[in-house]
């Protein structure tokens, strides 16, 4: 399944849901907690794990593959694209206004 901008992705093992902000430069699959994420509705309830917590409202990216996602529902991670882990983006410092 191609990962396109605007796509809302989820899986059955984590409560995490993301919206793709920037598409990757190569074809591949986005995974959360080791399971491929899809646009299909979640079946059943997500299971709690001991993985990394994916924070609500944060952007995660991987510059090597060019992907960026926005978390719209928190859950257990990590987020990976074809084995490359996505890291939380840091806020850009704005110039002083005085």
Image (cartoon, rainbow, N blue to C red):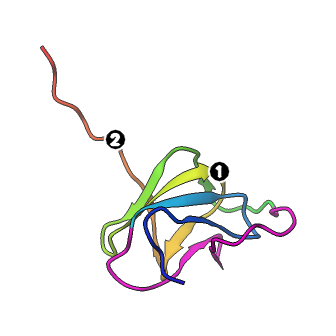
Secondary structure mostly seen in the magenta stretch: loop
Q: Give the SS element for disc 2.
A: loop
Q: Judge whether residue 45 is colored magenta.
A: yes
Mark 1 or mark 2: name the one nearer the start of the chain: 1
Above or below for 20 versus 29? above
User: Which residue is label 2 attached to?
Assistant: 91
Give the x, y percent position of residue 43. 83, 69
Q: Residue furthest top?
A: 98
| Percent coordinates x, y for residue 53 in the rendering | 63, 53
Q: Any mark on residue 73, and which?
A: 1
Residue drawn 27% across the image and 41% down it:
92
Q: SS of the residue at dot 1? A: strand
- Residue 15 disc label: none
Q: Quadrant of residue 91?
A: top left
Residue 76 in which image quadrant: bottom right
Spatial separation of the CA atoms under disc 1 and disc 2? 20 Å
Q: Classify the position of the C terminus by image quarter.
A: top left
Q: Nearer the viewer, residue 45 or 19?
A: 19
């Amino acid at each position: 399944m191609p990962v396109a901008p605007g796509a809302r992705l989820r899986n059955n093992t984590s409560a995490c849901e993301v919206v793709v902000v920037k598409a990757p430069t190569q074809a591949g699959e986005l995974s959360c907690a080791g399971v491929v994420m899809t646009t299909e509705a979640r079946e059943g309830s997500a299971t709690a794990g001991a993985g990394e917590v994916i924070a609500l409202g944060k952007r995660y990216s991987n510059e090597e593959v060019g992907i960026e996602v926005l978390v719209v529902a928190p859950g257990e991670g990590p987020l990976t694209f074809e084995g490359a882990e996505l890291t939380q983006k840091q806020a850009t410092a704005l110039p002083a206004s005085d």
